[in-house]
Amino acid sequence: MAGTFMAIMDVFIVLIAAPAIQDDLHASDAQLQFVLAGYQLIYAVTLVTGGRLGDLYGRKKVFLIGMGLFTLASLGCGLAPDASSLIAARLVQGAGAALMFPQVYAIVRVLLAEEHRARAFGILGAVVSLSTVTGQVVGGLLVEADLFGTGWRPVFWINVPIGLVTLMLAAVLLPESRAPRARRLDIPGTAALMVTLFLLIVPLVEGRELGWPAWTWASLAGSALALWGFIAVERRVARADRSPLLDTALLRQRTLSIGVGLVLIYYAGLNSFFLIMSLLLQNGLGLPAYQAGLVYMPLAVAMFVASLASSRLTPRFGRRVLEVGGAIATVSSGATVAAALLGGPRLSVGVLVVCLFLQGTGHGLLQSPLIGVILTPVDEDNAGLASGVLSTAQQVGGALGVAVIGVIFYGSLGSAQSGAAAAYTHSFGITVVFTTVLLAMTTALVFLLPYRRSRAGT
């Protein structure tokens, strides 16, 4: 659970610290986006590989290696002298998270009896919600405290003592386990996916600041060819009776193919929304970091409570819970747009908090049971692989969302400087129109899922 807590918290703690990082390191908008998207990109590409390494070489061993790498990279992030060094350390941090995170699910499934797993996964869901709250609130407090004049750097250093304690306890308490018939690594597929994503994301992040030179359009076109190549590689690996990173045969299952698209779209809007919210609150409205973190609190608390409620409601009402959650999130996101565009520089933080509370309620009902509902029709032999595909789609969606929404937000912001409340509020409102459309698309796709009750209710 500590591995889960750290991997998720590090997404949200950096979101709240983003303005301070940009100001201190004199980072460009594109570099700031890479600090966020780079972590998710490497995480996405190596997530399934991390799970298979645990099956092959031992889940405890790979968990310890991943935790050690994550902890060391966190120290490096906090020591980074410039934006490029921070981006490099974040890439290593993403690789460490991808090694340790899949072992959590595998260890729970292997070590716990079936009657205890539901409770363990319920705790896991609570830990994910708790890490979201902690990242936003503690991140703001640490930046504002400016411990020993170190500014934003403690948001990374906080991982070091947690990581060291977890390493010592895991080394003593965790038993080792391996899969009896472990899947082999798909190195060609991993390389092809990485090339595809870099060709797609790098021009989206860099293009606006560079004036969209020819290489950005060539790279975007090349990403389509690389995607075709990735699919061809995966089909060849499957025909050779090896284990592909993405089994394209799985996508012939209607529910899973809809689910992959749904997860991609949903997470493309979720994390990127928090980025532009942090920029609005701190750079636009001039709130100190700790107050910006507190603005998130109602959303995080509502999301936590709704997540717990969804675990009880989903076994009874199935897909209906997701439909209601998606509708609430979409309508409240639309209300956020109205509040921003109508309020302008006089945008009321109180009105924003109400909108965020409603969004948190919707996201909690939608997000928590989403993966379980999608996986319900998948047979048990393919459940693990399908879960890995959905987790990868989640991280890819997050990275793409930061890249695309960054283009919209910074493009509409233009040359406005920090403190230009009217410009930041307008740009925020325009960008949230896009995230609202993504939520509406997500909700529409939920209605295409089978109307069944989740076996696990999670």
Image (spheres, rainbow, N blue to C red):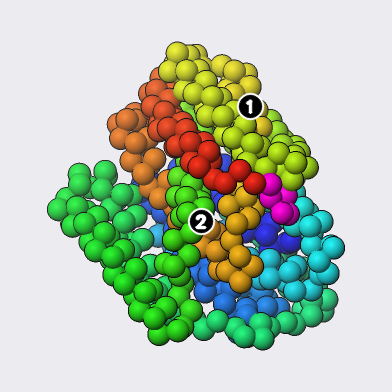
Instruction: Give the side of residue 93 with respect to residue 229, left or right.
Output: right
Please name the residue shown 48% across and 79% down the image: 243
> In the rendered image, which residue does mark 1 sit on?
358
> In the rendered image, which residue does mark 2 sit on?
256
Q: Position of residue 98 (x, y in %)?
A: 56, 67
Label 2, label 1: how many angstroms apart (C-alpha)?
A: 29 Å
- One can see residue 358 in this view: yes
* Secondary structure that dominates the magenta span: loop
Mark number, residue 53: none
Q: Position of residue 365 (x, y in %)?
A: 66, 38
State which mark lies toward you, 2 or 1: 2
**Magenta-tinted stretch:** 453-458
Estimate how packed mark 1 is, as few (under 14), some (14 to 19) or many (20 or more) residues with alpha carbons within 10 Å.
Answer: many
Please name the residue shown 68% across and 66% down the image: 105
- One can see residue 152 in this view: no
Q: Position of residue 420 (x, y in %)?
A: 41, 24
Estimate how packed mark 2 is, as few (under 14), some (14 to 19) or many (20 or more) residues with alpha carbons within 10 Å.
Answer: many
Q: Of 325 and 169, which appears nearest the observer?
A: 325
Can you say whether 279 is above or below 457 in the image? above
SS label for mark 2: helix
> Furthest-front residue in view?
451
Q: Which of marks 1 and 2 precedes in the sequence?
A: 2
Residue 62, image quadrant: bottom right
Please name the residue shown 72% across and 49% down the image: 457
Q: Quarter of the image containing the N terminus?
A: bottom right
Instruction: Give the side of residue 189 with respect to residue 48, left or right.
Output: left
Q: Of 114 and 268, which appears nearest the observer?
A: 114
Please name the residue shown 47% across and 33% down the image: 440
